[in-house]
Amino acid sequence: MQAETTRQAVPGLIRVKKKSRLADLFREVKRNRHYYILISPYMLIFFTFTVIPVVVSMGLSFFYFNMLEFPRFVGWQNYTRLFLDDDVFLIALKNTFIFAMITGPVSYVACFLFAWIINELSPRIRAFMTLVFYAPSISGNVFFIWLIVFSGDSYGYLNGFLMRYGFILEPIQWLTDEKYILTIVIIVQLWLSLGTSFLAFIAGFQTIDRTLIEAGAVDGIKNRWQELWFITLPSMRPQLLFGAVMQITASFAVADISIALAGFPSVNYAAHTVVTHLMDYGTIRFEMGYASAIATVLFLIMIGTNLMTQKLLRKVGE
Amino acid sequence: MTLPAKMLVGFRVRRRLNRSLTVNFLLFAFLGVFGCFSAIPLIYAVNNAFKPLDELFIFPPRILVRNPTLDNFYDLVVLMSNSWVPLSRYIVNTLLITVVGTVGHILLASAAAYPLAKYRFPGSRTLFSIVVLSLMFSGHVTAIPNYMVMSWLGWINTHLSIIVPSLAFPLGLFLMKQFMEQIPDALLEAAKIDGASEYRIYWSVVMPNVKPAWLTLMILQFPMLWGSDGGNFIYSENLKTLHYALGQISQGGIARAGVGAAVALILMIVPITLFIISQSNVIQTMTTSGMKD
């Protein structure tokens, strides 16, 4: 807008830039103080119970600490012990990965698929089906019902059913037989895994521009599968990214269901996961340094998988 | 330009584009089968609460109740009024944790979400990135330092240890912030011109406009606190929650099966009812839940 540029008479006489960076920041902070006041209660709690603990946990993983004596620095020893000397941890790690590799993708696809089909229904049936699929994830600890289904005696539903129709003669000990435990925990986890991301997908489908689909049909999209790939998926990318984060984090965090169904510890550690291993050392043995090393490994696995998936998903429909 | 005639005909014949009847049928059947898989355990849990004892242990087991009775609920009241800590105590504890935790979370998360959604100030983007990053790991990661912080604050064996950390649940802030972004700036400008302070704008302009998001935060926070068993933090009997009492009852074995089913029904029916009431609002909030590139 200015007609001519102004220049300092003696260059460098007034050191505008150097001095003012901090002062600028200070002024900015002061100008925005109301916003800082508004966010401070939340951030105070968030930092105390989430951010700082992550950092502390990483630091603590290099110490031996039992809550009574002063922490003693041990370097990488906790990690070498974890990966070289702790057979149970390796079982837990293997189980967690099997678990996450199955429940993560399957529940993600299920959330998407069911939301997609539900979207074709009329609004009232749509609301009902949403409730049917979402209810298990908010009904709290009703998954104890599955204890009755997989109960080891002939009163268990599955045993009762199989015996009645002559598939088996003796009841199977579903929850104490190593062969079945992991599968059962996976099934129950899948049952209650249609949570927040499922709702996000339902909502995502409702925001898709109808005119885009009509335009696609004019341009030669012949069936619903092409419509899904070329129109629906790309327009839902933000929800897809959000849903992936929710499902991945949940699939690595399995513990409660494993404990409720298979016990703690489970028979021969057949349903032992990284989180139950963490609970074992953190709340029973009180080896806090070692437990922190487990927590740090879990943290890195979760963050790593999430960031990798985000990168992959950004390519959808490109 | 060269539209095939077939397609033009198709437009007129079918109401929905590109939908074949066969595939529709197959997909809906698929949905139905998995819908049953999803619903039957819940239907069973509801029916169990009304079954007399002999039906609970029938062989082969049945899902639906034949002679419904309220005996289990009477037994529950009798059992609990005779026990050391009355049932009402567990209910009050659970209600206290749930209501304070949920309302507090909505207030704190929305207060923090408003500046993050609408203004740019030093540190605002970094703070929000940290919140998003924290969606990517579960609370188990922080469990051990949390226990130390709690014992340092002297909050072990108080309800604060359950309520306070839940106030800063990151998903709530994330969803609230995404939803607030769609409030038109003009509305805020107008309030500012009228002389309203930032707090006033937050409370009387922003908050009434994000009611759907309140309900969404409620539906995410409520079941978590409602189902809380106190974890490692609470060990006094008179501070424990309803969910903990359920665990105790069901450990009573066969004789307590009916009462256990009644408590389970109470525990599951409240969050489900809340969801039924708030569903359309929740879906509305979720339309803005996406993560941007």
Image (cartoon, coloured by chain):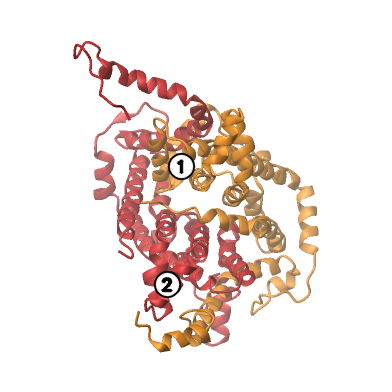
Chain colours: A red, B orange
Disc 1 or 2, which lies upstream in sequence? 2
Label 2: state its secondary structure.
helix
Q: Quadrant of the N terminus of chain B?
A: bottom left
Q: Residue at label 1?
A: A283
Closer-to-camera residue (B197/B195): B195
Report the side of B218 relative to A270 (left or right): right
The residue at the point 52 percent across, 58 percent down is: A260
The residue at the point 33 percent across, 65 percent down is: A317
Residue A186 in the image: state x and y as whole percent. Answer: 44, 65
Dividing the picture into quadrants, the one containing residue A123 is: bottom right
| Residues at marks 1 and 2, CA–CA distance in whole angstroms | 59 Å
Label 1 is found on which chain of the structure?
A
Label 1: state its secondary structure.
helix
Q: Can you say whether B177 is above or below A241 in the image?
A: above
Q: Can you say whether A194 is above or below B169 in the image?
A: below
Query: Is residue A134 in view from this perspective?
Result: yes
Closer-to-camera residue (B40/B185): B185
Q: Residue furthest left?
A: A11
Residue A189 in the image: state x and y as whole percent. Answer: 48, 63
**Residue type for callout 2:** Ala
Label 2 is found on which chain of the structure?
A
Closer-to-camera residue (A205/B171): A205
Q: Say yes or no: labels 1 and 2 on the same chain.
A: yes
The residue at the point 55 percent across, 28 percent down is: B154
**Residue type for callout 1:** Thr
Of tags 1 and 2, which is closer to the observer? 2
Cβ–Cβ below 8 Å for labels 1 and 2? no
Q: Residue at label 2?
A: A215
